[in-house]
Amino acid sequence: MNRIDNTGEAKLKYATPDFQIVRPGSYVRCAVTGEAIPLDLLKYWSVERQEAYVDAAASFSRTSGSDAGS
């Protein structure tokens, strides 16, 4: 029987206003904190950087932080 395992880390392609699932999973990692973010709670990401954020504060710190010039 072929069964898709949705319990690991997903790989997503971030777009506006949504994302596409490239590899199934139940969560992604915050690019700032490393915290696991369940896909059903994912609200913040960067299309340009192709990364997810756990909350607005993490998103803001990433775009205004020390790597803002990257």
Image (spheres, rainbow, N blue to C red):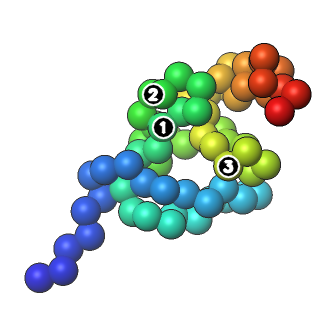
Q: Nearer the viewer, residue 67 or 48?
A: 67
Is residue 26 visible in this depiction of the protein? no
Residue most extreme to the left: 1
Q: Are marks 1 and 3 in contact (CB under 8 Å)?
A: no
Disc 1 + disc 2, Cβ < 8 Å: yes
> Which amino acid lies under the numbered mark 3 shown in the image of this protein?
Gln
Please give the name of the residue rendered at 62% of the width and 60% of the height, measured from the top-left corner.
13
Vertical placement of residue 28 versus 32, above or below: below
User: Residue beneath label 1, please?
Assistant: 29
* Between 25 and 43, the one nearer to me in the picture: 25
Distance from the alpha carbon under mark 2 to that under mark 3? 16 Å
Element type where label 1 sits in the image: strand
Taking the image as shown, residue 32 lies to the left or right of residue 64, namely left
Name the secondary structure under disc 3: loop
Point out the tag, 2 or 3, that comes first from the N-terminus. 2
Q: Amino acid at mark 2?
A: Glu
Q: Which residue is mark 3?
A: 50
Q: Position of residue 14 (x, y in %)?
A: 66, 56
Q: Residues within 10 Å of mark 2 (few under 14, many from 20)?
A: few
Relative placement, left or right, of 58 versus 54 is: right
Quadrant into which the C terminus falls: top right
Say left or right for 53 vs 8.
right
Q: Is residue 10 above or below residue 53?
A: below
Q: Mark 1, residues whose alpha carbon is within 10 Å: few (<14), some, or many (≥20)? A: some
Q: Is residue 70 left or right of residue 14?
A: right
- Residue 58, by quadrant, is top right
